[in-house]
Amino acid sequence: MSAVLTWLYVPGDRPEVVAKALHSGADVVLVDLEDAVAPDRKAYALDATAELLSSGAPGPSPVHVRINALNGPLAEHEVRTLAPLPGLAGLRLPKTDSADQVRAVAAWAAHAPAELPLHPLLESALGIEYAYEIATATRSVRGLALGEADLRADLGIADETGLAWPRGRVVVAARAAGLAPPAQSVFPNVRDLEGLAASCARGRALGFLGRTAIHPRQLPVIERAFLPTEQDMEAAEEIVKAAATDSGALALPDGRFVDAAVVEGARRTLALASRPR
């Protein structure tokens, strides 16, 4: 899969909403069996999701599923039910606190027709503390995500100041594990698109790539915020062109020093700009 910029949450017990989400333009649709579903609707949500995925890819956007808490009574049954289905493209694992939890999910999903990508969601102090161990728990882990609402509650954080270190920790852990940069957590005010754009700009500066959305109207704002600008692309093209004529470190005409790491970053920028839509 090319770089994912937009992940759209939809409740698993609302099949009609899921059907619309599949044609929303989201890079990935996240069917939520956890927070968005009331306790008395959990069984129905699982049945509806299984039906959706039973015949193969249900739409143009790949479908990942957020299962219920890994230490609760539902997660194992959900994974064993969904893993064999041809339309399932990945799992999001909520409240992941240890590498052992990830390995347990991988074992539950061992009967899938192909290795199932896992995306642990770090939502607690313990999850942040063990971010790198979680990221490297199994080769099935393809990315990390940060759940800031639960993390705020766990840490007693009233504003964003206390989230600076957890955010940096997740970005560094993902990179150290050789994974794609993590996506930002949800922006809860679906009407404040200016605030969303400003928040995405801050996340991009921290090393995040893309964002999880809770409404389709947020998708184009997120995509614009994380796609390279024309200025970004011109700078990247200049670096790559200069590197093609020199095998070592070099200085650009404007005096900037460029080494191999900078060149690789420029290539990533150009690849992101040319990603399939």
Image (cartoon, rainbow, N blue to C red):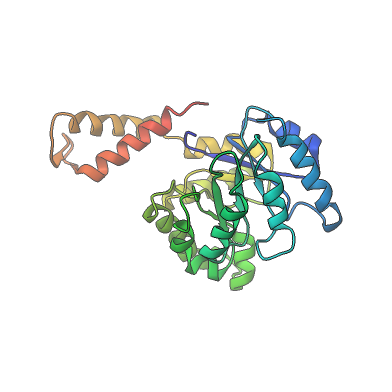
Nearer to me, 212 or 203: 212
Across and down, in percent, residue 71 comes to 67, 66
Q: Seen in the image, is 253 located left or right of residue 133?
A: left
Residue at the far front in the pictured view: 111
Residue at the far bottom in the pictured view: 156
Q: Is residue 183 above or below residue 229?
A: below
Name the residue at 24% across, 32% down: 240
Name the residue at 43% across, 48% down: 179
Q: Seen in the image, is 128 located left or right of residue 249?
A: right
Across and down, in percent, residue 212 comes to 60, 46
Q: Is residue 211 above or below residue 62?
A: below
Residue 206 visible in the displayed image: yes
Give residue 13's quadrant in the image.
Answer: top right
Across and down, in percent, residue 107 comes to 58, 55
Name the residue at 86% across, 56% down: 40
Q: Is residue 75 above or below residue 12?
A: below
Give residue 215's quadrant in the image.
Answer: top right
Residue at the far right in the pictured view: 40
Name the residue at 84% across, 47% down: 44
Q: How many circles with numbers are drawn on the protein?
A: 0
Nearer to me, 100 or 119: 100
Q: Seen in the image, is 246 located left or right of residue 16?
A: left
Nearer to me, 65 or 17: 65
Across and down, in percent, residue 68 comes to 70, 57
Q: Is residue 125 above or below residue 222?
A: below
